[in-house]
Image (tube, helix red, strand yellow):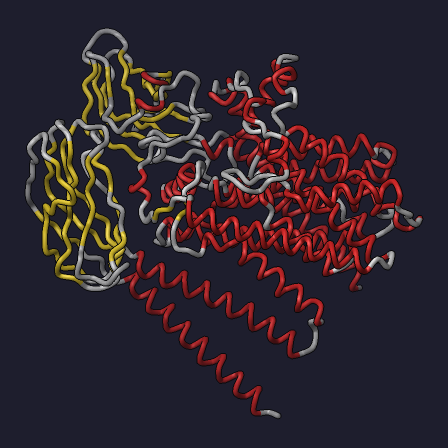
Amino acid sequence: MKAQPILRRKVNIVVFALLALVLAVGLILMLRPAREYRFEGQFSPTPGMVLRDEPIYQNISLRPGVYRVELSYETENPMGYLCTAKDDTVFHGGLLTNGENLYGGKGKTGYLMWLLEPTDNLDICLSYEGEIPLTTGDLVIRETGYLGSMIAVGTLMIFLLYLGLSVYAGYHKAGQISTENKKAIFGVVVIALMASIPFLLGVSLNGADLTFHLHRIEGIADGLRSGQFPVRIEPEWVHGHGYACGIFYCNILFYFPAILRLAGFPITFSYNVFCVLLNLATAIVSYGVFRKIFKDRTIGLVCCALYTLSGMRIFKTVMTGGPGENGAFVFLPLVVYGFYALLSYSTDSREFKKAYLPLAIGFAGLIQTHVLTCELTAFVSVMVCLVCWKRVFAKKRFGMLLKSVFATLVMCAWFLVPMLDFFVNENVHVKHISGRTIQEVGLKPAELFLRWGLSPTGIGFYMAAVLLLFGVMWICGKWQKEETSIAALGKIALCISVLMMAMSLRVFPWNAIQKLHPVLASLVGSIQFPYRFLGWANLFCVLLVGVCLWYMKHHGKEAMYRILLAGAALSIAAFSLHQLEYISKYQGNYVLYNVEGMGRGYISGAEYVIEGTVDTELTYRDVKHSENIEVSDYTKGSLRGIFTCKNTGTEEGYVDLPLLLYRGYRAEEMYTGRKLELIYGENNTVRVKIPAGFEGWVLVQHRPLWYWRLGEAVTLLGYGLWIWIEKSKNDEKIS
């Protein structure tokens, strides 16, 4: 009897020893002296030539590692030539890089390559086509410590996974996990894996929003490297001009893939791991919510599968490449459960006293992942409150609702303060989109139920059948008094889901609504696509499935219960097969290793630049200045610039830096601290006004405003106070 525990302990010792060994190897590789390889040379292709991966430096010998390739060059071409690395002698996947475009005005590349075996045959290659002259110069290949950090972080991830499995095995052996819970855990993991199949292929599936979100990940990594925390303005975005995406579009969930990037992992790997974890979080949260509402594990699993694998969610996650909106899907069920606990439970119950938590976490999560989904959720919440106004405005329930609102604001103060500051005080482009109409891009009625085609966002025939079934149950069903809360949930879900579906159609009068008031025009225009309402419509349809299953089970209608289960399984299987077929036939894909391979200029609709900025003209460049100004020793950093200048004239002059002028920039004489005035320069970049007779060093940099830091302090103090209060309550219960 004692042999098995002893053997298990020996296995654990061996596993932990191996993990510790690999971790030690990774740390040693991180700390070993880095090598630098320098090569001198020059190459100038004749204008008009067409070169494809032409070697300009050949037969370079390197040991395994992650290297930064820096090739100096001169050209006036904004973007069009490519430098990359090739080696046909290493194994497939042994050399990973996308290279970098040779941008005019930059003068030097700086891309990463991952070399996983030693080689003596590495070539640095050039692709050239055009009439604009190009001259390449010296090459520097610098070894980084990323290979060691990747091994170390990968080892820690394996350790955490093994630790989790060990804890589960321990509870399993002790008989503390029931058979039902084992089945539930297995089901949730399977559902998450089914949703994650597209992210286990080792590629990035092309989507309309994918490039933008990859830039967000890299922008956070760039900001963290420069010492900025939290990252408000991504410093290297827009060809080094900086982009205030983090001010308006909270990046809180994106810090995880950004940390993987800081550890040296390629961007495709970091993104795919992130999406798998989002799917797992969605499955766990939705299962927990549906199980709590219906108090049934089977119904919880069915609803979890229908929600996690819904057409709308898969469309946004996979086919458009939208992890921001995908993150919002994690928090929508929490809002549902929060309102259910607030309105249905007795005010003396434990569930009611904790109702503010899921509401606050749900809304805070939505604000910090996808503000637009939060706006739609606020609209749905207002409708629920209007329908249930008698219960909502009861003293204790209304007080609990206010508590959740206050908790949400505290949790989001660190993000809301700078966002509202920019929205009120900066003339950003996002404030001028009220002219965008959305009615013409709405769905046709048939698309609500069809999941086939290029945009499978509809609810499907199964959900439509459930809507009709509950309609019949509403009219003909016999509900017991103790079933009032479930019945009310179903009725509200039916009404709001139908309304949401109607609002997604092109026949809904969005254009007429926009004409009523400028505020309405702006709100409607910000929606962009009416099908976004199907996110909430689908969630309410899933709730209806749960209500119907609950009713059939508790009223002895076993046949109908099994038919509903079979229909759900068939619906999920049919759509999953269609999804895989679509991906294999129509969804383009690529593998991105270093972000330089996709450039630094894409900003989607340019919503967060100053109004009037021509984003296509924001390219890599040097400083510009007036005729009476002499500039030298210019150095550009992340959201900063340092230079010496001299005003040789009798009038005021200026220096324009390649930085977009956002709130928070300051200019001063470095050694005296004398403040210099900043104004909008060419294309809304930073312009420093140089007084007559000035001579000296000038420092321009972005600093967070004091009230931004106050918002961060409010959030930190709020979390600390909440932890202290909960700990005090637990101590009282124990005593």
Looking at the picture, how far across and down is residue 322, in whole percent?
A: 49, 40
Question: Looking at the image, is 421 positioned above or below residue 344?
Answer: above
334 vs 122, left or right, is right
Question: Looking at the image, is 426 positioned above or below residue 74?
Answer: above
33 vs 470, left or right, is left
Q: Residue at x 42, y 36 (%)?
A: 212
Q: Residue furthest top?
A: 650
Looking at the picture, how far across and down is residue 537, in whole percent?
A: 67, 38
Question: Looking at the image, is 529 positioned above or below residue 61?
Answer: above
| Residue nearest the observer in this picture, 523 or 196 | 196
Looking at the picture, how far across and down is residue 515, in whole percent?
A: 62, 12
Q: Residue at x 37, y 16 (%)?
A: 680
| Residue nearest the observer in this picture, 603 or 319 | 319
46 vs 548, left or right, is left
Q: Count up the numbered dots.
A: 0
Q: Quadrant of residue 5?
A: bottom right
Q: Is residue 335 visible?
A: no
Q: Residue at x 65, y 75 (%)?
A: 172
Looking at the picture, how far across and down is residue 658, in whole percent?
A: 30, 25
Q: Quadrant of the N terminus?
A: bottom right
Question: Looking at the image, is 586 positioned above or below residue 429?
Answer: below
670 vs 344, left or right, is left
| Residue nearest the observer in this picture, 293 or 351 | 293
Q: Quadrant of the C terminus?
A: bottom right
| Residue nearest the observer in this picture, 143 or 553 | 553
Q: Is residue 241 visible?
A: yes
